[in-house]
């Protein structure tokens, strides 16, 4: 018998938690709830959830801070729930380490679909890890040790979050090939129409910044192809 999907719903509004619980219970999800960031962080560190639905505005500790602190220990997929429609709020969530977002008022069916998309992505990632297409990628200024999830830029280690690593590894497997943002969203995030293309832009920005801290030359390898997408360009090619 398959293990039920474990889900943590974090929202200070009881009616929101009740509504989401009702929809996810139909698919036999194992559901826990929290109404504040402090309790939610403790629960997320003690239990390995498959997905976390996390409200941005919470008492005690907001969703941004909770995500940042959780990312120090775990890579649990997080969908941020926010009543704020501004781009800055979404970008702050992505920069903190959130994987996706929904804006209140939302359709419960859309939230269920987004969770299923994240679970699909996680399963695909696990499969690719098992297959281990390329354990070692060596390029000028850049070395990726895939089994260890270790990235070296000019011999110095680069500390990347899981999705930043996935994005770099994907680009590095096909150097000099241009990928559209849609293709990256589909293959790296395992999203089709549910994803926001700005998710890709935000992660590219963070990836460049982290590489630049260690090696400006490595950061320059991630090239924007205007009107199309991105590529990892090998110097001298």
Image: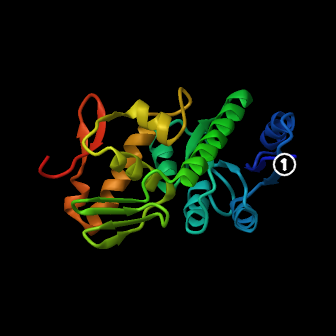
**Residue 82 at x, y = what percent?**
61, 42
Seen in the image, is 20 located left or right of residue 199? right
Query: Quick one: 87 or 187, which is closer to the camera?
Result: 187
Q: Which residue is rendered at x = 15% and y = 52% of the image?
A: 235
Q: Which image quadrant is residue 229 in? A: top left
Residue lying farthest to the bottom in this orientation: 156
Is 190 displayed left or right of 183 in the figure? right
Residue that extends furthest to the left in the rendered view of this protein: 236
Closer-to-camera residue (3/230): 3
Q: Is residue 171 left or right of residue 53?
A: left
Estimate the x, y position of residue 234 in percent, counting from the top left. 20, 50
> Label 1 neighbourhood size at 10 Å, few (<14), some (14-19), many (20+)?
some
Residue 89, image x, y percentages: 50, 45
Residue at 44% x, 56% y: name it: 165
Mark 1 — residue? Answer: 30
- One can see residue 82 in this view: no
Residue at left offset 38%, top offset 34%: 181
Q: In this image, 175 relative to 168: left or right?
A: left
- Vertical relation: 153 (above or below) 128: below
């Amino acid at each position: 018998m398959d293990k039920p999907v474990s889900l943590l719903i974090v929202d200070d509004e009881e009616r929101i938690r009740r509504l989401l619980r009702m929809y996810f219970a139909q698919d036999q999800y194992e559901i826990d709830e929290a109404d504040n960031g402090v309790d939610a962080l403790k629960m997320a560190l003690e239990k390995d959830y498959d997905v976390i639905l996390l409200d941005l505005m919470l008492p005690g500790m907001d969703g941004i801070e909770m995500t940042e602190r959780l990312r120090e220990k775990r890579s649990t997929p997080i969908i941020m729930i926010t009543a704020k429609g501004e781009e800055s709020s979404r970008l702050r969530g992505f920069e903190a380490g959130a994987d996706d977002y929904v804006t209140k008022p939302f359709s419960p069916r859309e939230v269920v679909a987004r969770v299923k998309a994240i679970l699909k992505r996680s399963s695909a990632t696990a499969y690719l890890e098992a297959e281990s297409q390329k354990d070692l990628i060596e390029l000028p200024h850049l070395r990726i040790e895939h089994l260890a999830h270790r990235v070296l830029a000019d011999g110095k280690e680069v500390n990347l979050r899981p999705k930043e690593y996935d994005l770099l590894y994907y680009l590095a497997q096909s150097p000099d090939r241009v990928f559209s943002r849609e293709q990256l969203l589909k293959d790296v995030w395992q999203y089709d129409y549910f994803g926001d293309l700005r998710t890709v832009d935000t992660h590219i920005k963070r990836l460049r910044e982290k590489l630049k801290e260690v090696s400006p030359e490595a950061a320059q390898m991630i090239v924007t192809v205007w009107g199309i997408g991105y590529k990892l360009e090998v110097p001298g090619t």
